[in-house]
Structure formats: C-alpha cells, structure tokens
Image: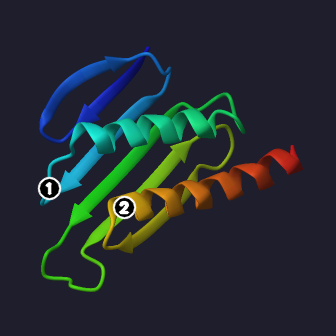
C-alpha cells in the first residue's frame, strides 16, 4: 500500500505501492490534478517496476505573469533518483512536459541496465 501525503490533507492510502508526497504553495490541489499525478506514476511503472517514492512540489505565483505555475518532480527508484521540473501557465501542459522528461530519463536508464 502506498501513502499519499499532501499539504492540507490527512494521509490517504492508495494502492500504488509508492509513497507520494505532494506539497503545494499558494494553491490547493483538485481531484483532477491528483488523478493526473497517479496516472503519471502508473505510466512510469512501464519503465521501472520498483518506484519507492514520488515527490511533487507545485507552486502557483500570480505575480509571475509569464510562468505563474511551477512543478518539480522527484522519482525515487533504485540507483540515482530522477528529477524534472518545468514552469508555465497551464497545469496540463506542465504535467505533460514533466512526464515526458521523466519518461525520457527512465528509457535511458532502462537501456543502460
């Protein structure tokens, strides 16, 4: 069983086998964004089966007009952890770009193993 920890939410069990820590700054996370995170982790499992943890840092800054949203993701896997981040205006676009960055790193890692 995995464990979901979020800034403004009590711990919730999720059946992913991964400890997920979601930290938000100046925002709250909705169910759609949370579902995207879980789907992203499931996609990563195609490349590596042993994911111990996934940390998501999400920030919204209305003062920054060009890139008001930031996401940073660290994936805990055997060997060095994988990290990706991005900034922009749309959560959906940011999530997709970060997912692509991590998938690319996982593919490289899998090719080396």
Residue 36: numbered disc = none
Could you tell me residue 101's position as x and y percent?
A: 60, 61
- As helix, strand or loop, the secondary structure at mark 1 comes to loop
Q: Could you tell me which quadrant the N terminus lies in?
A: top left
Circle 2 sits on which residue?
71
Residue at 59% in and 49% down: 81
Residue beneath the point at 44% across and 69% down: 86
Q: Could you say which quadrant of the image residue 71 lies in?
A: bottom left
Measure how far apart labels 1 and 2 are at the Cα level: 12 Å
**In this image, 79 relative to 68: left or right?**
right
As drawn, which residue projects farthest toward the right?
A: 112
Whole-percent x, y for residue 3 in the image: 35, 23
Q: Position of residue 16 (x, y in %)?
A: 48, 21
Q: What coloring was used for the rendering?
A: rainbow
| Residue for point 44% across, 56% down | 95
Looking at the picture, tell me which residue is in the foreground, 33 or 78.
33
Could you say which disc has been placed on residue 27 in the image? Answer: 1
């Amino acid at each position: 069983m995995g464990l979901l920890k979020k800034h403004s939410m009590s711990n919730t069990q999720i059946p992913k086998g991964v400890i997920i820590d979601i930290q938000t700054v100046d925002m709250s996370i909705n169910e759609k964004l949370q579902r995207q995170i879980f789907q992203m982790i499931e996609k990563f499992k195609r490349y590596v089966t042993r994911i111990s943890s996934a940390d998501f840092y999400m920030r919204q800054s209305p003062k920054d007009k060009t890139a008001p949203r930031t996401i940073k993701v660290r994936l805990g896997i055997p060997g060095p952890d994988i990290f990706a981040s991005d900034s922009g205006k749309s959560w959906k676009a940011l999530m997709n770009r970060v997912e692509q960055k991590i998938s690319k790193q996982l593919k490289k890692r899998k090719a080396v193993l």
